[in-house]
Image (cartoon, rainbow, N blue to C red):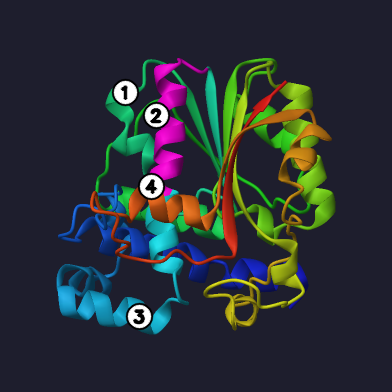
Amino acid sequence: MNEKERKEKNSPSTAGFVCFSRACAAEERDALMRGSDNLAQIFLPKWAWAVSKIPVLRKTFIQKIAPAGIYHYVIARTKVFDESYMVALKDQFSQIVILGAGMDSRALRMAAMNSGTRIFELDIPRIQQAKIRIFSRKKVHLPKELVFVPIDFNTSDLLSVLIEAGFRLNQTTLFLGEGILMYLDAAAVEHLFRFIRETSASGSRVTFDFVYASVLRKEQQYYGEKGLFDTVAQAGEGWTFGIEKGTEEKFLQDRGFKLVSLLTPADLEQKYFTTREGRLIGRVNGTHCIVLAELI
């Protein structure tokens, strides 16, 4: 089995964990903890669906399978990306491209807000085909704006793949890279940002999350970092790309973008998990940050 086959074979583990976490979060009783993805449960097998519905089982299972702070991070990240998606719909962007869509359900959850924005979901064939089969089996109505685009991010030509799927050049476009950059090699990351810069209109946006480069070096600087890199690698999905802390704005400027917002773990804790009285109800894993940027 070559490297490409190994990654494709194991990739559902990450997509499955994120989906399960979102389904569990949607069942949380505490409003601060409650997740925004109320459709994630349709992708779960029966046993996982049952676990997500029972508080004690839900809590025990998440604690057992999730590294410290990752569950809270997934809850917060989903909300940030939801907000970015909704703003693009409100601003009547021509297109939204979801990179590594996994079991994402935004095209369905926010269909009523969509007044004509084309939604392109990109992912490796194995995950995408499994998702389509679930939609078909459960007779889920898919919005006409949704287009599924199979791709291998490290080897496929992004332009030709998207053009064939109906992507239009020089349009205002939102690109969502949720849990994808850290799995790409440096060349693929450069190609992605160059693609966005060369094919999209000024004012187009990109929202993505990333890990600090020090995490790849196993420097153990952050909450929840211990063992996290190895855990991901053991799942057959090792992280290969990170950004040095403090260089985020320069990273974007060098590639033709301006930084709109940088959300650190502390920012996410303050925004999503802090009560009005100032009490923190949950910590966010410290290895990830989320960037919102705009094409200059």
Mark number for residue 63?
Answer: 3
Q: Is residue 285 left or right of residue 225?
A: left
Residue in view at x 40 percent, y 51 percent: 270
Q: Which tag is nearer the camera, tag 1 or tag 3?
A: 3
User: Which label lies toward us, 2 or 4?
Assistant: 4
Q: Label 1 crowding class (10 Å Cα cut-off): few <14, some 14-19, many 20+?
A: few
- Range of the magenta residues? 78-93
Q: Do the residues labelled 1 and 3 touch (CB within 8 Å)?
A: no
The reply to whether dot 2 and dot 1 touch (C-beta < 8 Å) is yes
Q: Give amino acid for label 3.
A: Gln
- Among the two numbered marks 1 and 3 on one chain, the one whose residue lies closer to the N terminus: 3
Q: What element carries label 2?
A: helix
CB under 8 Å between discs 2 and 4: no
First in sequence: mark 2 vs mark 1:
2
- In the displayed structure, would residue 26 be above or below residue 110? below
Nearer to me, 279 or 85: 279
Q: Residue at label 1? A: 113
Within the magenta stretch, is there residue 82?
yes
Q: Which of marks 3 and 4 is in front?
A: 4
Q: Which secondary structure type mostly characterizes the magenta part of the structure? A: helix
Q: Distance between the residues labelled 2 and 3?
A: 31 Å
Identify the amino acid type marked 1.
Answer: Met
Q: In this view, does 222 lie to the left or right of 132?
A: right
Q: Which amino acid does label 4 sit on?
A: Lys
Gap in Å between the C-alphas at discs 2 and 1? Answer: 8 Å
Q: Distance between the residues labelled 2 and 4?
A: 18 Å
